[in-house]
Image (cartoon, helix red, strand yellow):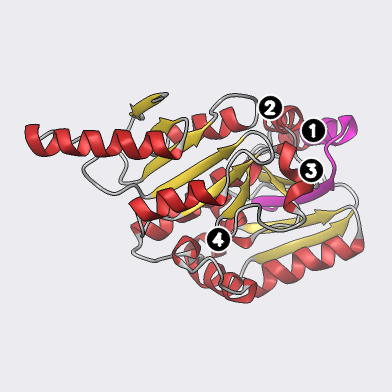
């Protein structure tokens, strides 16, 4: 059954997304809403329904010269609202219909335990709901720049090659425009973040353990909070009030819909999962112009 088709955003986009599965709830619903603002999204409840509708509408286009679904989808999203929602057969159906179309599995918090055992569908990359939008921004930037990006790499590629691809794809002007402070709860986490950002070309002006300073003049802050509790959210609100020009990215071990919404409401630009993906981090800064450095 066709759930919805040709959901048109407020602006036209060269990115066409096949959204297959649920678009409801605090996690998947949030991702769907933000994706539909950035791309043209067609929603279906199953791969066979998507294929049947697209074939029918393509036939209609050829007979009536209608523009509906006249190009291959850019990306297919298997929205996974529960473990085992999709199988390899579902991915095979889509890849046979559109051999060059990347397929990703969008996982909610219910998949936290499963993902630590490896991909649930061989050959299909699983993207957690809280990282999807930032990675989607990176994918769009790669497409507009004519780069294949990480989505253009084979699904079996080594993690080291993915890292190199993500690193070289970062826009140097975007990186150099931000002065970043890095704060983590533990020294080992701080060292890892500093090494990752330094090797990738980001300029780190301050690094410390504990809580972020209310007077740090950096234009961006990456705060590995460990987990988002009441005390972290209260401190985040104070950070936003004292440093309104600073873009704050919070890292959480297990982001949930309610805590993520609370952090965004408190002033965070994004809440990302741990471990941090370089591609995900890049996406948080692609659409943001750096503010003037604040003075203490």
Q: CA distance from mark 1 to mark 2?
A: 12 Å
Q: Which mark is residue 123?
A: 4
Query: Which of the two labelled residues, at mark 3 and mark 4, occupies the earlier sequence position?
Result: 4
Residue 84 horizontal side relative to residue 1, left or right: right
The front one of 180 and 49 is 49
Q: Which mark is residue 265?
A: 2
Q: Position of residue 63 (x, y in %)?
A: 8, 35
**Rendered residue at 47%/36% (across/down):** 20
Query: Which of the two labelled residues, at mark 2 and mark 4, occupies the earlier sequence position?
Result: 4
Q: CA distance from mark 3 to mark 4?
A: 24 Å
Nearer mark to the viewer, of 1 and 2 = 2
Q: CA distance from mark 1 to mark 3?
A: 23 Å
The front one of 111 and 90 is 90
Q: Are marks 3 and 4 in contact (CB under 8 Å)?
A: no
**Rendered residue at 75%/71% (across/down):** 195
The front one of 132 and 288 is 132
Q: Position of residue 40 (x, y in %)?
A: 35, 36
Residue at the spot of label 3: 254
Q: Are marks 2 and 3 in contact (CB under 8 Å)?
A: no
Nearer mark to the viewer, of 2 and 3 = 3
Vertical comparison of 179 with 14: above or below: below
Residue at the spot of label 1: 238
Vertical comparison of 76 with 184: above or below: above
Task: Say few, some or many: other residues with alpha carbon within 10 Å of mark 2 (under 14 / 14 to 19 / 20 or more).
Answer: few
Task: Say few, some or many: other residues with alpha carbon within 10 Å of mark 1 (under 14 / 14 to 19 / 20 or more).
Answer: some
Query: Which of the two labelled residues, at mark 1 and mark 2, occupies the earlier sequence position?
Result: 1
Q: Secondary structure at mark 2?
A: helix
Nearer mark to the viewer, of 2 and 4 = 4
Q: Are marks 2 and 4 in contact (CB under 8 Å)?
A: no
Residue 107 placement: quadrant: top right
Query: Which of the two labelled residues, at mark 2 and mark 3, occupies the earlier sequence position?
Result: 3
The span shown in magenta is 218-237
């Amino acid at each position: 059954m066709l759930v919805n088709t040709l959901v048109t955003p407020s602006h036209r986009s060269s990115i066409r997304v096949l959204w297959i599965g649920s678009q409801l709830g605090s996690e998947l619903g949030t991702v769907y809403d933000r994706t539909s603002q950035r791309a043209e999204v067609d929603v279906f409840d199953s791969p066979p329904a998507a294929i049947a509708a697209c074939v029918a509408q393509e036939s209609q286009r050829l007979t009536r010269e209608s523009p509906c679904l006249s190009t291959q989808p850019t990306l297919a999203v298997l929205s996974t609202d529960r473990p085992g929602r999709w199988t390899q057969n579902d991915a095979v159906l889509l890849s046979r219909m559109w051999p060059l179309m990347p397929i990703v599995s969008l996982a909610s918090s219910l998949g936290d335990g499963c993902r630590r055992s490896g991909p649930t569908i061989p050959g299909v990359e699983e993207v957690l709901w809280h990282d999807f939008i930032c990675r989607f921004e990176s994918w769009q930037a790669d497409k507009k720049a004519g780069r294949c990006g990480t989505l253009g790499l084979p699904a079996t590629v080594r993690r080291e090659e993915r890292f190199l691809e993500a690193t070289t794809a970062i826009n140097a002007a975007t990186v150099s425009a931000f002065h970043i402070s890095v704060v983590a709860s533990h020294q080992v986490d701080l060292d890892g973040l500093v090494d990752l950002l330094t090797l990738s070309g980001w300029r780190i002006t301050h690094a410390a353990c504990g809580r972020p300073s209310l007077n740090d003049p950096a234009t961006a802050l990456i705060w590995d909070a460990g987990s988002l509790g009441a005390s972290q959210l209260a401190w985040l609100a104070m950070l936003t009030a004292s440093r309104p020009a600073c873009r704050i990215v919070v890292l959480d071990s297990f982001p949930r819909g309610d805590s993520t919404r609370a952090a965004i409401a408190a002033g965070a630009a994004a809440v990302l999962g741990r471990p941090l993906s370089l591609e995900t981090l890049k996406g948080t800064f692609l659409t943001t112009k750096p503010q003037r450095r604040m003075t203490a």
